């Protein structure tokens, strides 16, 4: 309660600090203190806690957010999200590395009647990707001057304003230059665009033979067959397949008509015998 | 260590919402405050009620506490005020006092006479018990002003200055009250002086 010096000074100042009181003082000093019962102690502490909660300074929003994020369930959820995201990313990356089963249908070998029949229907395109249009590339040079359409090396490809959106399976599909409606970084090719696309003449059978031989020796069928068809025809076929996949039969018919007009052989091999397209063309 | 902190620091911590600080204050002062109240009012149940009320007031008034003030001064001011209020209420209700006559006839004794205080102590323990009871009666017999000063001075070991702060009177007045209180006790307990000397 106080320092001993203060107490001693007080004692010295007391006039009645005489010997007569000493025995009595010893009595009350020896009086034992009683222990209070615990009655009401819980209520007291509850009140103290309530008061303390009101006394605590209000935490800022980021402190509260941090406290929430530190909770074990949130941490566990974040871990699961990261793992799922990683697994998804790896899966997607794996898709790009796997050669697509229908990717080889571009070359002259695709003109053979057996291949389109055995190829599976075009993959289901997610709704978010249905509106996407592949990387608009510079229009290929006119095929009329050459018997083989020149292959555009990837380094020479240029983006022309619209975002590049690789198709599922990792193929870059070339879209003929035309009018595009920008939609948030993407571009949608309209039927008018398709109709206005200049279609080069198809390659000859000679080119197909060369490509087939190359594919047989290297095994890289997709790369070897790419120059076989003029890019525009190939692109139109792919657009046609995409349109069929999203159920746009009107576009399928329009595109099929163009392909038939530009390259009847390609039409027979790729369009007429495709079970996926048959639904729309019937 | 929080348990080594001074009372005033603990109060400041509690002002910042640290409940543990209040717990330590409670554990430190619960017993002495209870005994101060008990010796003041002379009733255990009332003392427990007043003890709880005193700490409730500490909780409610924690925001008003200033670091410069001594915590014990503040706490015992609260406790003393509660005791004084209780004493006034008791007087108002005219409760039977221990040393009041049991009935109006002059032959009747007091309540204290019924208590086993006058029995001869057969052993040392009984002597001590008897002395303590006699002492308690003598303290209860002091006036409120003398009693509070005596209790704080002799049982809580407070300096006169702090007692003056608690009671709210000048220090010399406190000394004067203490002098009268001791004088009265000496007269009251004069017959027990030899017994007190014999006690261990």
Image: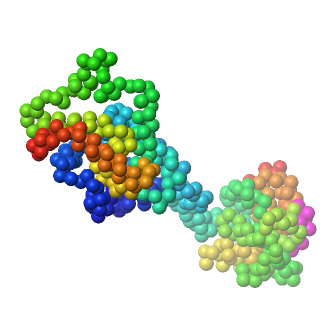
Q: What secondary structure prevails in the magenta region?
A: helix
Q: Quadrant of residue A2?
A: bottom left
Q: Which residues are magenta?
A: A191-200
Q: Position of residue B129 (x, y in %)?
A: 17, 36
Front residue of B69 and A262: B69
Residue at 21% over, 53% down: A18
Give the camera-side residue of B72 and B14: B72
User: Residue A100's quadrant in the figure?
Assistant: bottom right
Image check: A78 left or right of B115?
right
Residue A275 visible to an observer of this rendering: yes
Residue at 73% across, 60% down: A129
Which residue occupies 69% across, 57% down?
A123
Q: Nearer the viewer, residue A181 or A6?
A: A6
- Looking at the image, which residue is at 28% across and 49% down? B154
Residue B168 x/y as whole percent = 45, 50
Give left or right: position of A270 versus B16.
Answer: right
Q: Position of residue A136 (x, y in %)?
A: 80, 72
Left or right? Give the position of A211 relative to A97.
Answer: right
For the view shown, which residue lies furthest in the left direction? B122
């Amino acid at each position: 309660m106080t320092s001993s010096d203060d107490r001693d000074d007080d004692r010295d100042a007391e006039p009645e600090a005489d010997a007569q009181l000493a025995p009595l003082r010893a009595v009350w000093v020896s009086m034992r203190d009683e222990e209070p019962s615990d009655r009401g102690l819980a209520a007291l502490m509850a009140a103290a806690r309530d008061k303390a909660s009101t006394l605590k300074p209000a935490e800022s929003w980021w402190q509260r957010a941090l406290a929430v994020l530190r909770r074990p369930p949130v941490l566990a959820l974040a871990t699961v999200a990261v793992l799922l995201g990683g697994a998804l990313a790896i899966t997607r990356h794996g898709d790009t590395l796997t050669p697509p089963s229908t990717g080889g249908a571009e070359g002259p070998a695709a003109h053979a009647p057996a291949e389109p029949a055995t190829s599976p229907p075009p993959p289901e395109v997610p709704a978010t990707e249905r509106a996407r249009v592949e990387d608009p590339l510079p229009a290929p040079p006119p095929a009329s001057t050459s018997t083989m359409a020149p292959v555009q090396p990837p380094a020479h490809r240029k983006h022309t304003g619209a975002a590049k959106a690789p198709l599922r399976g990792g193929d870059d599909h070339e879209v003929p230059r035309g009018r595009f409606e920008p939609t948030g970084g993407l571009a949608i090719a309209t039927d008018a665009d398709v109709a206005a696309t200049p279609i080069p003449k198809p390659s000859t059978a000679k080119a197909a033979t060369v490509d087939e031989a190359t594919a047989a020796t290297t095994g890289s069928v997709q790369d070897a067959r790419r120059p076989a068809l003029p890019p525009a025809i190939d692109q139109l076929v792919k657009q046609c397949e995409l349109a069929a996949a999203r159920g746009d039969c009107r576009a399928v018919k329009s595109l099929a008509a163009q392909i038939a007009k530009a390259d009847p052989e390609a039409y027979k091999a790729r369009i007429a015998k495709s079970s996926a397209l048959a639904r729309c063309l019937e | 260590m929080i348990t080594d902190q001074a009372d005033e620091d603990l109060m400041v911590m509690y002002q910042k919402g640290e409940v543990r600080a209040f717990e330590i204050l409670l554990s430190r002062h619960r017993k002495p405050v209870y005994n101060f109240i008990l010796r003041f009012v002379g009733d255990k149940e009332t003392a427990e009620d007043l003890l709880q009320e005193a700490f409730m007031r500490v909780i409610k008034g924690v925001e008003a506490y200033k670091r410069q003030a001594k915590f014990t001064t503040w706490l015992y001011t609260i406790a003393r005020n509660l005791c004084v209020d209780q004493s006034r209420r008791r007087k108002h209700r005219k409760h039977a006092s221990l040393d009041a006559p049991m009935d109006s006839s002059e032959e009747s004794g007091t309540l204290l006479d019924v208590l086993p205080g006058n029995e001869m102590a057969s052993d040392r323990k009984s002597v001590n018990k008897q002395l303590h009871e006699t002492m308690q009666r003598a303290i209860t017999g002091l006036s409120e002003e003398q009693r509070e000063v005596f209790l704080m001075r002799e049982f809580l070991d407070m300096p006169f200055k702090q007692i003056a702060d608690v009671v709210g009177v000048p220090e010399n007045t406190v000394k004067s009250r203490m002098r009268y209180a001791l004088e009265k006790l000496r007269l009251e307990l004069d017959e027990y002086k030899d017994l007190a000397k014999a006690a261990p």
